[in-house]
Amino acid sequence: MDTKQDKLDKDFAQKFTRTLNWGLSRIEDEKLARIRAGRQKALAAYREPVSILGLVTVSGHTLDVSNWIRKPLFWLPILAIVAAVAAYTLSGTDDIYDETGGELDAQLLTGELPINAFLDKDFGSWVKESSQ
Amino acid sequence: MGERIFAIIGAVIVALVLAINSPVAYAQAKSESKGAPQSPPVSWKKVPDSERRVLSPLEKDWSQLSGNQQRRLVGAARQFPKMAPIQQERFQDRLKEWSALTPAERHAARDKYKNLSSLPPAKQYELREKWQEKTSHPKGDAAAPPNSPIK
C-alpha cells in the first residue's frame, strides 16, 4: 500500500514527465537529428559491465584496448619500462668500470715506488711530516 | 580506474629507475672506500677482451675479489694502452700483490699515494731517495720489506 510520501513522489514524477514531454512535439528537425545521432553513438559505445575474477565489476569500456591506446596515460608505464630496460642495458656495460678509482690505482701501480713503500709505516710518517 | 592504475604503475617504475641509476647511488656502489656499499661481483666473462688480457694473471682469483675491487681493476686495466712500456711492466708485475692486499691495506696505500702526489716534485724525489736508502740498507725492523727494487 502506498504511503503518503509515495503519493507525493508519484505526483511529482508525473508533473516532471509532463513538463519534459510538453516540448517534444515542437523540437526542430535539425536538433532532433543531433539528439538521435548522439544517442546512437552512446549506445554504440556502451559495453556491458564486466566482472574481473568475480571481485570487481568494471565498465565494459575499461577493457576495450582500442580505448586505452588513445589515452596518454596508457603509454606512461610502457615508456617507463622501456627506459628501465634501456638504463639497465647501458649500465650493464658501464657499471663494470670504476674509472676514477681505477685511474688512481693504475697510477699507484705504475709509479716508481713499489707497493710496499705505501704500506711501510716509516714511509707513511715521512710523507705525513712532509705534508705538514 | 584503469588510467589510475597505469599512472601508479608508471610512477613506481620511474621512481625505481631514478633511484637505481642516480649518480650518487652509482658512485657510492662503485667505491671501495670505508663503509661504502658493496657492488655485485663482475663475472670474468663480462670483462671486455682488452681488459681481460691485462688482468689475466688474476683470472684464477677473480671470483675471490669483491665487486668494488673488480670494478677498480677493470677501470685500471682500461688505462693500460695509455701507459708507457715500463709502466705496463710495473702494472702487470704488481697486479697480483695489489689484489692480495686487504681492502684496508689498499685504502691506506691510496691515502699515502695521494698525500705523496700532493707534495712538490722535489720533495717527492727526496722521499723516494730516502726510501731507496732505507731498503738498500735494512735495519731489521722493516715492517714490510720490499719485493722489488725501485727502477
Image (spheres, rainbow, N blue to C red):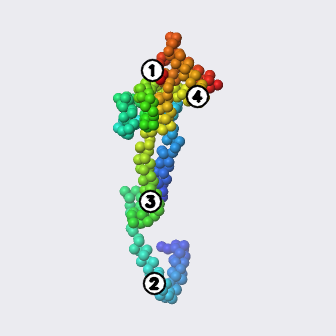
Q: Between residues A25 and A3, which one lies in front from this camera angle?
A: A25
Label 1 to label 4: alpha-carbon separation = 23 Å
- The answer to whether marks 1 and 3 sit on the same chain is no
Q: Amino acid at mark 4?
A: Pro
* Rendered location of residue A35, percent (x, y): 47, 81
Disc 1: CA contacts within 10 A as few (<14), some (14-19) or many (>=20): few
Disc 3: CA contacts within 10 A as few (<14), some (14-19) or many (>=20): some
Can residue B13 be seen in this snapshot?
yes
User: The residue marked by circle 3 belongs to what chain?
Assistant: A
Nearer to us: label 4 or label 3: 4
Which numbered dot is residue B148?
1
Q: Provide the residue designation for mark 3.
A: A75
Q: Provide the residue designation for mark 2.
A: A33
Which numbered dot is residue B121?
4
* Rendered location of residue B131, percent (x, y): 53, 19
Label 1 to label 2: alpha-carbon separation = 99 Å
Label 4 to label 3: alpha-carbon separation = 60 Å
Q: Is residue B68 left or right of residue A12?
A: left
Residue A128 vs B39, above or below: the answer is above
- The answer to whether marks 2 and 4 sit on the same chain is no
